[in-house]
Image: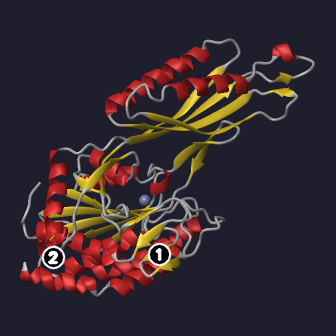
């Protein structure tokens, strides 16, 4: 353990550099659809990662799809996936993942970091997850500085579409998950240090309801009102909430119609579904189909759906649970109490788990209020969390645990 102490001291010395860097990164807008900003983020982050001496491949993300306001399928282009490989032929291999994107678009008022007090930094992405990417970087630099690096290989994936469901990078996440022994993802921990254990699965869906347009005065009886039909359907979806414990359905967006004197021929609802188990996922899919069939059986109506579950629930399996136990023991060595709790949120840790890779996905900084303009990171957690990840990497490299 003595030699690890020196490395951990080196990590402590990186505090100022980490804080300055997260501020600089926070000033670069990298909203999931700001391709220019994501490219800039990619540039500065990959430059910082050069210190690892890993091989880098910039990979194109698969195009996504969305339903536009006219009910048509549109292609969506995502930013690239930065894929680093270090010592790919090592016997032990770890996958480290992070995302460059944030939920704040280019025209959002929240664009700059501000110190709220000596230990609290408010800013876009400071916790979710530009700070986390720095934790990853410093832990890997620490590994490279140790005498242990030779026995551990790793791959790093930095994607640009996590906040919009990682559909563009999902295939690459799965591919790398299959090549590694466990995964480390750097989403923020809760402010008190709690990590995310089990996670729900999630899917995004659209219903495109088509009726028949008509003049609301002259030929009202010839119309079939798509908005009225969709409103009924949404009420039925909403009623499914509470029928299965843990399953939630959130109709989140609705559009349709053109003018009050026109019977609308089109209305669209987009909604999110969260499930605790894959059985719930199948249950929802069956219920949803039954509802759609009912409207399709009505004269003059056509109800189409688009979308699917993008992330399956993350369950704490044997190996995954063991990984948490290992981290808990390592935390004790540096005075960090490691605890975890289930959450309804999802992240790339769901994707890795679905590919069979045990992983801990909240190894980033401690923080909170993410996805709002009050997002904050606690500065004393930067080196604290980097030390925790360093210990995990060093101990795996040393063969001190197996999964
Ligand atoms: Zn995140």
Above or below for 306 versus 48:
above
Q: Quadrant of the N terminus?
A: bottom left
User: Relative to residue 141, is residue 64 drawn left or right?
Assistant: right
Q: Nearer the viewer, residue 167 or 343?
A: 343
Q: Position of residue 198 (x, y in %)?
A: 29, 46
Residue that appears at 57% across and 59% down: 33
- Density class for disc 2 (Cα within 10 Å; few <14, some 14-19, many ≥20) is some
Q: Position of residue 194 (x, y in %)?
A: 30, 59
The colour scheme of the drawn protein is: secondary structure
Q: Which residue: 83% across, 13% down? A: 221
Q: Ligand 1 quadrant? A: bottom left
The Cα–Cα distance between marks 1 and 2, rounded to whole angstroms, is 33 Å
Q: Regarding mark 2 in the picture, which secondary structure is present there?
A: helix
Judging by the rendered image, the residue that carries numbered circle 1 is 121
Q: Quadrant of residue 15?
A: bottom left
Q: Check disc 2 and report the residue beneath it.
A: 149
Direction from residue 220 to residue 111 in the image, left or right: left
Residue in view at x 54 percent, y 67 percent: 30
């Amino acid at each position: 353990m003595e030699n690890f102490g020196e490395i951990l001291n080196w990590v402590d010395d990186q505090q100022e550099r980490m804080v300055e860097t997260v501020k600089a990164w926070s000033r670069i807008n990298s909203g999931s659809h700001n391709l220019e900003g994501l490219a800039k983020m990619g540039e500065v982050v990959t430059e910082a990662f050069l210190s690892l001496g890993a091989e880098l491949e910039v990979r194109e993300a698969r195009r996504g799809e969305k339903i536009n306001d006219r009910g048509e399928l549109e292609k969506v282009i995502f930013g690239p996936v930065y894929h680093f490989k270090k010592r790919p032929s090592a016997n032990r291999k770890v996958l480290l993942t992070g995302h460059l994107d944030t939920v704040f678009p280019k025209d959002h008022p929240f664009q700059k970091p501000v110190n709220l007090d000596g230990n609290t930094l408010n800013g876009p992405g400071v916790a979710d997850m530009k700070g986390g990417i720095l934790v990853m970087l410093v832990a890997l630099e620490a590994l490279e500085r140790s005498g242990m690096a030779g026995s551990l290989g790793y791959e790093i994936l930095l994607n640009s579409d996590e906040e919009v469901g990682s559909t563009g990078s999902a295939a690459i996440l799965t591919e790398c998950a299959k090549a590694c022994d466990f995964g480390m993802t750097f989403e923020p921990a809760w402010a008190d240090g709690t990590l995310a254990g089990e996670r729900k699965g999630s899917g995004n869906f659209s219903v495109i309801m088509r009726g028949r347009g008509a003049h609301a005065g002259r030929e009202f009886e010839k119309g079939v009102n798509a908005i009225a039909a969709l409103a009924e359907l949404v009420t039925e979806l909403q009623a499914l909430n509470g029928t299965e414990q843990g399953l939630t359905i959130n109709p989140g967006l609705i559009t349709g119609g053109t003018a009050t004197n026109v019977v609308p021929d089109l209305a669209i609802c987009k909604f999110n579904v969260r499930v605790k188990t894959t059985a719930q996922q199948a249950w929802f899919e069956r219920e949803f189909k039954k509802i759609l069939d009912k409207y399709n059986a009505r004269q003059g109506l056509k109800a189409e759906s688009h979308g699917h579950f993008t992330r399956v629930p993350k369950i704490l399996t044997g190996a995954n649970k063991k990984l948490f136990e290992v981290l808990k023991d390592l935390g004790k060595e540096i005075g960090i109490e490691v605890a975890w709790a289930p959450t309804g949120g999802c992240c790339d840790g769901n994707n890795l788990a679905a590919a069979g890779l045990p992983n801990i996905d909240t190894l980033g900084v401690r923080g909170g209020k993410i996805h709002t303009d009050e997002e904050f990171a606690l500065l004393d957690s930067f080196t604290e969390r980097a030390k925790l990840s360093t210990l995990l990497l060093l101990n795996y490299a040393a063969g001190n645990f197996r999964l």
